[in-house]
Image (cartoon, rainbow, N blue to C red):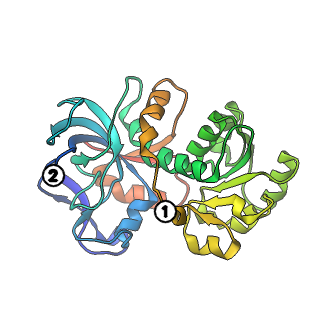
Amino acid sequence: MRTLRFHTYGDPADVLRIEDAEPPRPGPGQIRVAVTACGLNPADWGLCGGLFAGDLPRGIGLEVSGTVDAVGDGVTGVGIGDPVFGPAPFTGPTAGASEQALLDIWFPRPRGLDTAGAAALPMAVGTAYAALDALGVDSGHTVLIHGAGTTTGHAAAQIAAGRGARVIATAGETHAAALRDIGVEVTGYGDGMARRVTELAGGPVELALDTAPFSNALAELVRTVKAPEHVLTVGGPEPARELGVRSALDIGGGPRYDVLGTFGRLAAEGRFAIPVSRTFSLEDWPAALELSRSHRARGKLVLRLG
């Protein structure tokens, strides 16, 4: 099978290669899928640089959708040919950006949810849901989602609104209309963001979630709340600690993948979405890398396989 992987750590543009590899064999409790679509994330490029370092070679691709083509011992409730989606393990010699991939966690892909849309869900939904839980966002809260134009931020705004919270979000015009349609109050990025947010809220917001750590806006976000610990970032812990902000990486627990089935059904019904910006062939992965690094993807980037 063809797979996208690396044999040494370094810049992904330098170390990633498309290669032929043996298809992985599902172990107990695992399934193998013929991959149709693979979502790409900044974490994929981090793996190339040594994030969660381990034995090499190693593949990239943390989320997939496809059809079951093999099942391991003890697997029930799913059969060959069933359409599924889920997060792909990334500690083996291949991962989701492959013609075949293993899954430890999977959910049926419902009718009405296409393969690219399904592959866009796992990381964004799982990360956003866990972060909102860590913040304690619930009905009646006023929460700021910084970076609602990112996939995690877009998911977080929808999930928080679904919980009954008042949601204020920073986002560009690409997704502003869709956010406003579900009751989110939207303002722009950049200078004066804290002032605009507090004017919309009528004072400090109760909670704030930073889903765009690349924007380096933590200091500005602290000015939107009453205390720094009311801010949580999905970024690294070091910048957060300097400002008294919490980091999702410090809290631990990982993404909440157990909720993916619910959000898959909502997406199939048109009541939830992670926008897919562009799809690429496996051979065109360098273009996906370039667009991802520009921070101008404006939605999920997906590799199409099969």
Query: Taking 290 as reference, is 94 left or right?
Result: left
Instruction: Say above or below: 231 vs 149.
Output: below
**Residue 96 drawn at (x, y percent):** 29, 51
Task: Examine the rendering and report whether any part of residue 211 can be seen.
Answer: yes
Residue at 43 percent of width and 55 percent of height: 41
- Amino acid type assigned to the residue bearing label 1 in the image: Arg
- Amino acid type assigned to the residue bearing label 2 in the image: Pro
Given residues 114 and 162, the one toward you in this image is 162
Question: Which residue lies under the disc numbered 2?
Answer: 24
**Residue 67 drawn at (x, y percent):** 24, 34
Q: Quadrant of residue 11?
A: bottom left
Query: Taking 68 as reference, is 211 left or right?
Result: right
Query: Taking 215 as reference, is 43 left or right?
Result: left
Inter-mark Cα distance, 1 to 2: 30 Å
Q: Secondary structure at mark 1?
A: helix
Instruction: Say above or below: 64 vs 209.
Output: above
Dot label at residue 293: 1
- In the rendered structure, which disc, 1 or 2, sits on the residue that comes first in sequence? 2
**Residue 247 drawn at (x, y percent):** 58, 64
Residue at 41 percent of width and 24 percent of height: 112
Query: Taking 56 as reference, is 202 left or right?
Result: right
Q: Quadrant of residue 231?
A: bottom right
